[in-house]
Image: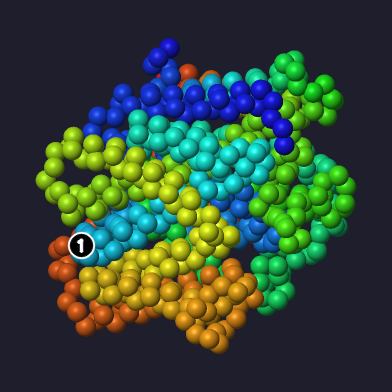
Amino acid sequence: MLSRLENLLFVIGLFLFSIGGVVFMSHFFGGSDLVQTIHVNRLGGGMLVTVGIVMIGLSFREEQ
Amino acid sequence: MNLTWIDYLIIVIYFIFVIGIGVMVKRKTKSSADFLQSGRSLPLWITALAFISANLGAQEVIGMAASGAKYGIMTSHFYWLGAIPAMVFLGIFMMPFYYGSRARSVPEYLVLRFDEKTRTFNAFSFAAMTLFSSGVSLYALAILFQTLLGWPFDVSILLAAGIVMAYTFLGGLTSAVYNEVLQFFLIVLGIAPIVYIGMINVGGWEGMTQVLDKSMTSTWQFMGHESQNTMGVNLWQMVMGLGFVLSFGYWCTDFLVVQRAMIAKNMSAAQRTPLVAAFPKMLLPFVVILPGLIALTLHKVGGDFQLPLKTDGRIDYDLTLPMLLGHYYPTGMLGVGLTALIASFMSGMAGNVTAFNAVWTYDIYQAHIKKDGTDDHYLTVGKITTVVGILLSIATAYLAREFNNIMDLLQLIFGFINAPLFATFMLGMFWKRTTSAGAFFGLIMGTLGATLTHGLTVAEGKGGWLIGEPLHEFASGMGHAFFIAIMSWSICFMVTLLVSLITKPKPESELEGLVYSLTTKPRTKYQSLHENPYVLAGVVLVVTTYLNYLYW
């Protein structure tokens, strides 16, 4: 696990996935319930999570 | 603007990751070359993203959105005219000399090509400029967070400077570069949703063109005379001043950006760094300039979004992007947006500090104070310089409080220092007859010429300090800055040329690998098209031309 953290693609992917996850789920943790608000957070959070997953995936492919 | 714990959590996660990168990189940082040059081992995708990210500081992110609202799509000239052609020139013509000469910095190339005094002049002026830019970044961050969130000025400065110091001290240039790549993704993904939602809101490009004045949605049509466009710049000033002198001066000779290409793992990667970077760079206007146009459209339509006003009743354009974040982003994305802004400030600051580090250690300390130190000694000097650089940046941030318009001031400084420097490099790299005396006097006279031009002419109440009745009044500060750059470049070019003709050049044997006509061009067989820098350069130029045509 420690060596994986030395892979920049993996680290950035993990970072984007983490903050994207927080944004995506924010309305469960006390964020607004307004439809517009949920829509914006799902859009932005979804983008962050997607790019994060792609980068994590690429980091595994890079090592093979 | 109110933040909740979710927004603060995102900011904290960001701080953990940037410092974590510093900690991870520290284990691999064993020599001064690792600390100051990343061991010249980084792959192309990292150097290319770091190359544009080093320039994606606060002045770019907040400043370009502000310019988008103030000047419209003409602001894209800073990319499609004022960056891409110079990046292509750097990749094709100049990187082979920077990388091939094994110089560790741009000033070090100058000592190889010319002499010590030219290197020292450039090293000191560059060091001063990086510290100033770094301080301005800090100052802007503190003012912004004081205005938006009510954070005390001193707290913002100490927090941001402390975190940048932590990760650059731990991992040196590699840590800064890795963080720049992370910051690039954060900035783009943090701001892109605003563009998407905003464009839907204003009815797309068509909707904007119906609301805004035609000069705001056209890049070239209103360039005939400075009175026709909001920038107050004419075609000659734009093309010669921004498109040639300032642009080439910055992208081809400023060590802050060139350093990112110089640390690539081989010549091919170094040459392709600015070319690959040009692809995201040419699309950045859609992320950083469009928000300004969206904000202005919303402001003109007169709905629930209004741009903020200064105390004198004029629009405060510098708050365009933060106001849009507050308007569109709820808790969650607001945290991401603000973290992206923090990242842009920190990215700009770290870039300047790491470039300052290398220039101070190699070109000032090693050249003039201790020539024969051990590698450990220079590693220690590099680390101490990081701390001193950050402390000086903090001091500069407090000094920067005295100045109002950050962008104009930076343009002015680039005009004074960078513009003549490009004339020196151009002649030095492509004319073997250029002498050390010519280069040195050319640089001095070019910088003096810029100062004189500023003192004799005036724009927006600035300049004209040498004379009661200024020789000429420019329509705008930007036009003034472009003209000063043209003058200083021309003076440097002419003086270098004339002095070179009457002084003795270096023998040709000493110039191999440093001058175009005396360097053997390797015949490289490229495995694929994307490895060929000429193909990349061609594609970049075609797409850039098309973008200029599209928003004609």
Q: Is residue B381 left or right of residue B13?
A: left
Q: Amino acid at mark 1?
A: Glu
**Residue B39 in view here:** no
Pointer 1 chain: B
Q: Name which quarter of the figure residue B474 lies in.
A: bottom right
Q: Looking at this rendering, what residue extends furthest in the top direction?
A: A1
The residue carrying pointer 1 sits among few (fewer than 14), some (14 to 19) or many (20 or more) residues within 10 Å by Cα, namely some
Question: Where A38 sits versus B327, above or below?
Answer: above
According to the picture, the residue beneath numbered tag 1 turns out to be B116
Which quadrant would residue A48 be assigned to in this image? top right
Query: Residue B150, image x and y in percent?
Result: 65, 39
Q: Residue at x 66, y 23 (%)?
A: B5
A54 or B168, nearer to the observer: B168
Q: Which one is in front, B519 or B450?
A: B450
Residue B49 x/y as whole percent = 48, 40
Q: Residue at x 58, y 28 (%)?
A: B11
> How far across and how far down the image is residue B325, in percent?
71, 39
Give the total of numbered labels: 1
Task: Determine whether B462 is above or below B410 in the image.
Answer: below
Would residue B211 be found to the left or right of residue B507 on screen? right
Location of the C terminus of chain B (image quadrant): bottom right
Q: Residue at x 66, y 37 (%)?
A: B149
Identified at 53% across, 86% down, the residue is B468
Quadrant in which residue B387 is drawn: top left
Residue B298 in view (yes/no): yes
| Residue B124 pos. (x, y %) | 31, 59
Relative depth, front residue between B134 and B154: B154
